[in-house]
Image (spheres, rainbow, N blue to C red):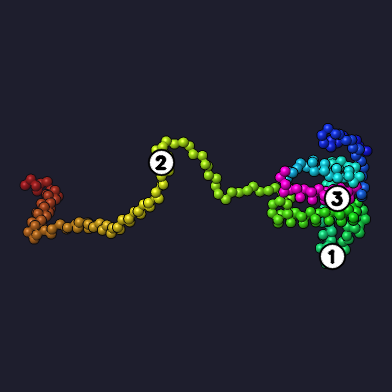
Amino acid sequence: MHLMMDDQGGNNAVTREYRKGNWTVNETMVLIEAKEMDYERRMKRSGDHSEGRNKPTELRWKWVEDYCWGKCCLRSQNQCNDKWDNLMRDYKKVREYQRKVAEREGNDSKQRSYWEMEKNERKEKNLPSNMLRQIYDRLEEVVEKKGAQTVAATAGGGGGSDPNITNLPYVMDRPMVSTFQPSLPPLLQHQLSAPIPAAIPLPLPQASPQLPPPPAPIIQPPPLSYAQPLPTIAQILIQVSIQTHQQREGEEVVAMAKAPVGLLTT
């Protein structure tokens, strides 16, 4: 036994001797009943704001401890909390395994039910080795009842909602308008109090008339190159006469150059 001072309110302190060791089947059933009653109690009081919608976990487990002590289950709130966590962990493993077995029955599966296996076989499948059928059935009853109450409370809207579910903040449909108005001179107050005329829409700017495209620039043709005027017949005859005279003079010079020196002196 473990001795502990427990404050029951005020200055009255009561010494409780907590039991240690493994939990008996009767103690486990009392704990399950205490959790069931605690949930129903919190569901009924969840709509009462004076009771507080979200009490600390320590206070809730203190209520479970007191309930268990009233049923001769001499366990502390910490022991109850730890035992409940272990029960729910084992229950979920067995429930998931049983669900898979039920799904495979139509496929001619030879997988056996959890309740048909020995302890060593349960350990090989990573399952709890000592879950009793009566404890499992009682947990299943509490879990299903809790789920149905939660759904009903949620559908009812508001008062019976699960305190573990965080409520969403209320969203206002209209923006908040400040009612504070600073003091202004009378003239400005009169101007502000006067109705503001509706804004007159400005006339749309008229589209400028579309001008015809400018004419293409006139390209001046390049000047024609005129040929030299043809020479006249007289000019041709004079040119031929000059060329003939020059040719004769050239021939005479050549002949004189070829003649002997003696002939030139005579």
Determine which of the numbered discs, if any, sits on residue 190 in the image. 2
The answer to whether 255 appears left or right of 217 in the picture is left
**Mark 3, secondary structure of its residue:** helix
Q: Does the magenta stretch include residue 40?
A: yes
**Mark 1, secondary structure of its residue:** helix
How far from the left and from the top, in percent, is residue 138? Answer: 86, 54
Calculate the distance from the C-alpha at mark 3 to the C-alpha at mark 2: 74 Å
Q: Which residue: 82% across, 54% down?
A: 142
Quarter of the image with the N terminus is: top right
User: Which residue carries the number 3 mark?
Assistant: 33
The answer to whether 230 appears left or right of 137 in the picture is left
Front residue (pair 3, 100)? 3
User: Which residue carries the number 1 mark?
Assistant: 105
Q: Nearer the viewer, mark 3 or mark 2?
A: 2
Determine which of the numbered discs, if any, sits on residue 93 in the image. none
Q: Which of marks 3 and 1 is in front?
A: 3
- In magenta, the rendered stretch is 27-50
Callout 1 crowding tier (Cα within 10 Å): few <14, some 14–19, many ≥20 = few
Q: Looking at the picture, which amino acid does disc 2 mark?
A: His
N-term-proximal mark, 3 vs 2: 3
The answer to whether 67 appears left or right of 203 in the picture is right
